[in-house]
Image (cartoon, rainbow, N blue to C red):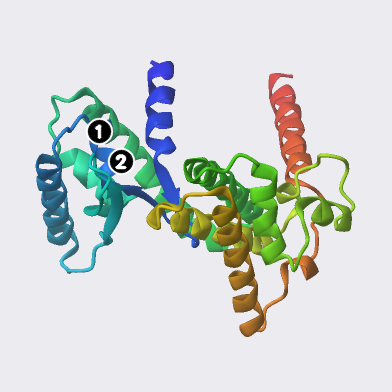
């Protein structure tokens, strides 16, 4: 049973995307085949039922369902645009509630989105009350998921040298610094993860870089490694310019935490073991 649960979670997590502010979303066209729908018209009917359910339960017209146009290449080699939607987690939850329950993945999706929607509500509600280290863990988890999605988008764009690709983004955001330069400035050990050694504000800036680059690569159907690298660099640079314009602290000037997230995680596990051992005694 646990194996089925883990497999199901991975399927839905693999097609998840993350906005710069940490909000998660799914593309309707990617969710459709996963829920075993083969025709867009049928799936679109389910989406519209979910929208009605949302409006009826919230008594307003504000729902997160941005319509987008995705470029595709037809069998004849022509470029056309098809309708798609960006779906919030809650809208996905309503979609699976209104979908055909006889489909196995619909039933599994109902459980997944019900649990995860509740978790998201708690995360958003409690974030302001988290300690700095807890915020770091939260933001780091988002950057891991974001980088996973970004790597898929980059691979689809034709990127093969991922070190160069990721360094393009760092160079834009950090005024020319590569990942190695950042690690040296932070006095990190060889191959120590730089993201594990950032505060929540620095992680948030990098999350914005990650998510905006992924969105640009996907929405503009970017092809070519050099073009993808240039886009990543420019987005990093643009974020840096916004920080400067708002009078914020540049990423390289933000303080490096005294302990990495790996060290904090190790301490957590040791404390948990000691507490468990004490309870047994």
42 vs 259: above or below: above
Q: Is residue 101 above or below residue 148?
A: above
Q: Quadrant of the N terminus?
A: top left
Residue 258 visible in image: no
Where does residue 187 sit, x and y in percent of width and height?
A: 90, 52
Residue 220 higher or lower than 26, as above or below: below
Q: Identify the residue at image location x=72%, y=47%.
A: 196
Cα–Cα span, label 2 and label 1: 6 Å
Residue 9, horizontal then vertical, whole percent: 40, 31
Secondary structure state at the residue bearing disc 1:
helix
Nearer to us in this view, 133 or 68: 68
**Residue ID at (73%, 65%):** 174
Residue topped by disc 2: 30
* Residue at figure coordinates x 78%, y 47% from the top left: 260
Q: Is residue 186 visible?
A: yes
Q: Identify the residue shown where x is 20% and y is 44%.
A: 95
Camera-side residue of 68 and 271 = 68
Crowding near the residue tagged with mark 1, few <14, some 14–19, many ≥20 C-alpha atoms within 10 Å: some
Tell me if 252 is positioned left or right of 146 in this view: right
Report the front residue among 53 and 43: 43
User: To which residue does mark 1 refer?
Assistant: 33
Classify mark 2: residues with Cα within 10 Å, few (<14), some (14-19) or many (20+): some
Give the x, y percent position of residue 7: 41, 23
**Which quarter of the figure has residue 77?**
top left
Q: Dots 2 and 1: beta carbons under 8 Å?
A: yes
Q: Quadrant of residue 215?
A: bottom left
> Which SS class for mark 2?
helix
Q: Position of residue 93 (x, y in %)?
A: 26, 44
């Amino acid at each position: 049973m646990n194996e089925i649960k883990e497999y199901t979670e991975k399927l839905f997590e693999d097609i998840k995307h993350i906005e710069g502010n940490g909000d998660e979303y799914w593309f309707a066209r990617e969710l459709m085949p996963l829920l075993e729908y083969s025709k867009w018209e049928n799936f679109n009917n389910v989406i519209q039922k979910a929208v009605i359910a949302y409006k009826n339960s919230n008594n307003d017209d504000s729902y997160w369902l941005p319509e987008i146009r995705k470029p595709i290449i037809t069998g004849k080699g022509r470029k056309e645009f098809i309708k798609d939607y960006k779906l919030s987690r809650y809208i996905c939850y309503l979609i699976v509630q209104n979908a055909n329950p006889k489909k196995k993945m619909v039933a599994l999706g109902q459980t997944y989105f019900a649990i995860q929607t509740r978790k998201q509500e708690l995360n958003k509600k409690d974030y302001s009350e988290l300690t700095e280290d807890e915020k770091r863990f939260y933001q780091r988890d988002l950057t891991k998921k974001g980088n996973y999605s970004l790597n898929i988008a980059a691979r689809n764009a034709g990127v093969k040298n991922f070190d160069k690709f990721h360094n393009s983004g760092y160079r834009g955001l950090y005024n020319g610094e590569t990942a190695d330069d950042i690690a040296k400035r932070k006095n990190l050990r060889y191959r120590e993860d730089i993201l594990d050694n950032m505060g929540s504000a620095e992680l948030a800036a990098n999350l914005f870089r990650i998510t905006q680059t992924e969105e640009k690569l996907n929405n503009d159907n970017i092809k070519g490694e050099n073009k993808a690298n240039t886009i990543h660099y420019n987005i990093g640079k643009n974020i840096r310019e916004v920080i400067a314009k708002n009078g914020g602290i540049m990423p390289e000037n933000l303080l490096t935490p005294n302990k990495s997230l790996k060290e904090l995680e190790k301490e957590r596990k040791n404390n948990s073991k000691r507490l468990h051992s004490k309870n047994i005694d």
